[in-house]
Image (cartoon, helix red, strand yellow):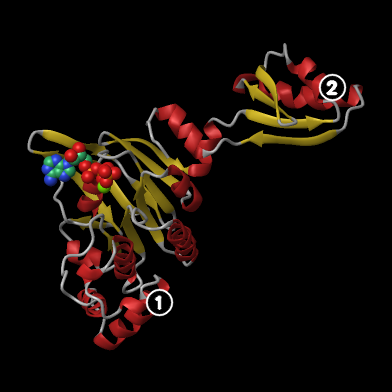
Amino acid sequence: MNDYIIETRELTKFFGRRNVIYHLDLKVPKGVVYGFLGPNGAGKTTTIKMLTGALKPTYGEIRIFGMEMPRERVEIMRKVGYMPERPIAYKDMKIFDFLVYMGRLKGLPKEKAIREVRELMAYTGVGRLAFNRIKELSSGQRQRVTFAMALMGNPRLLILDEPTSNLDPLGRMEFIGKVLELARGGKTIFISSHIISEIERMCNYVGLIKEGQLIEQGRVREIVNIESRDYDVIVSDNGKLIEFLKDKVYAVEVWEEEGVVRVRLDKRFMESFFLDVPLFLAENKLALKLFKPHTSPLERILMKRFNLGWEE
Ligand SMILES: Nc1ncnc2c1ncn2[C@@H]1O[C@H](COP(=O)(O)OP(=O)(O)OP(=O)(O)O)[C@@H](O)[C@H]1O
Ligand SMILES: [Mg+2]
């Protein structure tokens, strides 16, 4: 089980008789930004709490860095930056002291912890709040402090539970930029969210959870490609091309959208499409201006495929 940074097997959680997580097999490869997507109540937070040792699985196995959770919790969590959904107790503590304290818990020497806190507070945009108490912060400010907390000690793995839920639009954009930057620096990042458009911008890997079960998992590129059998074509006479394609066996549908001919292909006969079109163009002396697969955005595919009923 050592190929993945996070790997679970048949991870299952009951609350009393209620089965909230069922047979979850998460696989998070090294270096990916993994979007853990699912609607409210799907089980994201419950899963994350089990990954970080805050909740005990009813059964199943969790390995992080190849170590076993919860048995090796302390050792694992020294290498993990965790941003919980509902952040921070210690409401009377000052931000600066709180972060230094968290750094010490991570095993940092005091001097190093202080240095890191200064840097991270500036990095997450709470530099001016150093001497405010946690209870005095707005929810967005609190989320920023929690992000700084997760980054203490330069962990190799970040586990972030809806890290942008309280951020303003600019804050969200900045956050996405930071995630991409951290990923480039080699960190593995696991982020839960129900905002597909946001996940699409920062993640290259997704896992979809619905009613406690993982219904899809893999590279975003691959998930999107499963459905991408639409082709976009522009030629010097689009009308002629549409006429030609209309009754072909490989063209399930042909239509024009904003000057682009879009062809929905039957995957079984796609080869014929690739042979036919160039011949047709040559015979009719038509110029080819655009020819590329139309990749639909993740959002549309997920909505359609899983009927998830998201608003955003
Ligand atoms: N301590 C608990 N006791 C009983 N049921 C719980 C408990 N914690 C969570 N649940 C239930 O488990 C289900 C999953 O909750 P969870 O918080 O994991 O969802 P989520 O995917 O994080 O949702 P959200 O997007 O709203 O944060 C919910 O139906 C919730 O009511
Ligand atoms: Mg949650």
**For the residue carrying disc 1, how many other residues have a C-alpha within 10 Å: few (<14), some (14-19), or many (20+)?**
some
Element carrying mark 2: helix
Indicate the position of residue 203 as horizontal and vertical percent values: 46, 51
> What residue lies at 86% left-to-right and 30% top-to-bottom?
236
Q: Is residue 130 left or right of residue 257?
A: left
Q: Which mark is residue 93?
A: none
> What residue lies at 33% left-to-right and 70% top-to-bottom?
148
Element carrying mark 1: helix
Q: Quadrant of residue 168?
A: bottom left
Q: Quadrant of residue 44?
A: top left
Mark 1 or 2, closer to the camera: 1
Outermost residue on the left side: it is 16
Q: Which mark is residue 280?
A: 2
Counting residues from the start of the chain, the first of labels 1 and 2 encountered is 1
Are the residues at dot 1 and dot 2 in contact (C-beta closer than 8 Å)? no
Indicate the position of residue 141 as horizontal and vertical percent values: 32, 66
Indicate the position of residue 41 as horizontal and vertical percent values: 25, 39
Residue 26 or 246: which is nearer the viewer? 246
Q: Quadrant of residue 52?
A: bottom left
- Location of the C terminus by quadrant is top left
Indicate the position of residue 11 as horizontal and vertical percent values: 22, 42
Asked if residue 19 is positioned above or below residue 253 in the image, the reply reads below
Q: Is mark 2 within 8 Å of ligand 1?
A: no
Asked if residue 100 is positioned above or below residue 230 in the image, the reply reads below
> What residue lies at 13% left-to-right and 50% top-to-bottom?
56
Q: Is residue 281 left or right of residue 25?
A: right
Residue hosting label 1 = 122
> What residue lies at 24% left-to-right and 53% top-to-bottom?
51
Marks 1 and 2 sit apart, C-alpha to C-alpha, by 61 Å
- Amino acid type, callout 1: Ala
